[in-house]
Image: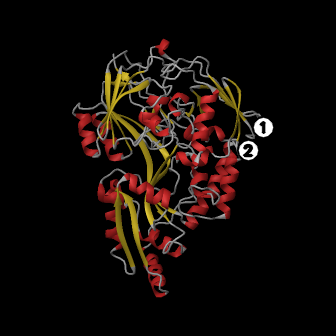
Amino acid sequence: MPLRRIPARRRAPGAGTRTRAAAAACAALAIALTACGGSDKAKSPAGATQEAKAGGSLTMLALSDSRALDPFTASGVAVADEPRLAALYDPLVYLDPTDGSVKPHLAESLTTADRGATWTLKLRAGVKFSDGTDFTADAVKLTWETHAKPETRSTQTSYATGLALRVVDPLTVEITPKSANPNFDRLVATRLTYIAAPSALAKGVAEAGAKPVGAGPFVLQSWTRGSEQVFVRNPNYWQKDKGLPKLDKLTIKAVQDREQQYTTVKAGGADLVPSSYPDYLDRAAKELRVAQLSLIGGQHIAFNLRQAPFDDIRARRALALALDPTEVPKALGNGFVPAKNFFNHSSPFFDPSATQAAQNEKEAQRLFDELAAEGKKVDFTYTISQTGIKVAELMKSRLDQYRNVSMRIEPLDIAAFVMKFNVQRNFQAGQYQSWLPDPEPEMWSLFHSASPLNQNGWKNAQADKALDDARASTDPAVRKQAYATLQKAMAEDLPVWVYAESTIGIIYAERVTGVQMYNAGSLFMDRLGLSG
């Protein structure tokens, strides 16, 4: 395999146009990705990437307050904490949605010369954390080692565990993954890209999460718990000589109701909000502005194969055949695009021959009856976050029309849902959503039988081999074939049933500019600003 290199940026940040196609469905931009990426479309309205004027302040909305503002326990998705992490830390490297490639930011390069057995990370010279200390290889090593410590309880523990890290010089880290991984740069871009200052970590992770110190464009000025966070310009920002960040101040307010979020932006009470709901993105395209991405993953029912009734393939198949993905947007008017499988239909990896079976009410009823006759009635609790209640109620109303199936809805707040679903794994079936800019590394983590993050306990030898083959290659054709095999195994074995494609976008007011996304819909916060 030839040496794989992330070239250093040659243009000033902010120049040119960047939308995002790997942030999947986040805002439906229209830029085709190559087969290296997870999505093929991205739309960027006129003016989205025009350079912002210097100064001013913007208000962004989020569904909830942060639990913490460190790279370990914050929720790293665009509709939750990733905009805050981007503001405070800046990414080392990132996935570019315009072409699906990994590109450098705080790093100068991330390379492998031996098919992913070892990697070399080189950092930019002259970068400082917001407290004035140097951004060094030791800082990267410390953050990644902190992720790997069990006592940290990092959401990225499995990604950092087993990495052998050697500081070669103040700006160079040599990395040896647990096993050769030609796609390790994708893991860094999506899971290990935010680095905390050693000066903050020296006070403990809890203190680092309450008083964060990063190398990003902003610093935390104040935090009113449950309400808002105020960020101001970082005086030590590494791109200050280029006039970045553009803004003097950024405020992020917690507003849980999606309709209230939208109407607040429309009325001028806030300037932008991330959203994963297509109906709001469609409205924004007509009334405001929107940048949108289509991603891998979608909204789906995750079955727990470790517990009855869904340890029996017939129960999973019966539920999938009883429901119709196309009914969700028709009944609820939420704009969801009905899913065909775990991959967005516009993804270069999508295999049209490996789609989920269409609704078949007669066969579903036959399976429900067959299981009941054996004393295995499909009687289950559906665990969801409170935001998914309408879809869950629709599903229950449809299942109530069948014999020998009973569904109870268990709505939980986000923290309780994560604990029960992700940590305790004490569920029968759960509503879940993934926003994947690329299949790697998340699909291996979610579905490989050897993964500690395999939440639903799926074990399938064909799927394991496909995931291993995809991870072992950077050849688009090889990856495409491997993921086609995976899709066939998923359609046959049904570890999940996907009912809506994954989309994410940024809804924003006309005065906002510099909207440029990376990964799964996060924003480059240094370029965000006001039009002249």
Up-down relation of residue 319 to residue 163 (above or below) = below
First in residue order: circle 1 vs circle 2: 1
Up-down relation of residue 279 to residue 353 (above or below) = above
Q: Quadrant of residue 34?
A: top right
The image shows residue 403 at horizontal and vertical percentages of: 37, 81
Q: Residues within 10 Å of mark 2 (few under 14, many from 20)?
A: some
Q: Which mark is residue 39?
A: none
Q: Nearer the viewer, residue 196 or 484?
A: 196
Q: Residue at x 62, y 57 (%)?
A: 448
Q: Nearer the viewer, residue 495 or 22?
A: 495
Q: Which residue is mark 1?
A: 114
The image shows residue 196 at horizontal and vertical percentages of: 53, 32
Instruction: Describe the colour scheme in one phrase.
Output: secondary structure
Up-down relation of residue 100 to residue 241 (above or below) = below
Amino acid type assigned to the residue bearing label 1 in the image: Asp
Q: Which residue is mark 2?
A: 180
Q: Residue at x 39, y 56 (%)?
A: 416
**Quick one: quadrant of the N terminus?**
top right
The answer, for residue 256, to whether it is visible in the render is: yes
| Mark 1 touches mark 2? (CB < 8 Å) | yes
Q: Nearer the viewer, residue 507 or 304?
A: 304
In the displayed structure, does residue 204 sit left or right of residue 249? right
In the displayed structure, does residue 133 sit left or right of residue 221? right
Per the image, label 1 sits on a secondary structure element best described as: loop
The image shows residue 251 at horizontal and vertical percentages of: 32, 29
Per the image, label 2 sits on a secondary structure element best described as: loop
Q: Residue at x 48, y 17 (%)?
A: 236
In the displayed structure, does residue 164 sit left or right of residue 514? right
- Cα distance in 3D space between marks 1 and 2: 9 Å
Amino acid type assigned to the residue bearing label 2 in the image: Ala
**Quick one: quadrant of the C terminus?**
top left
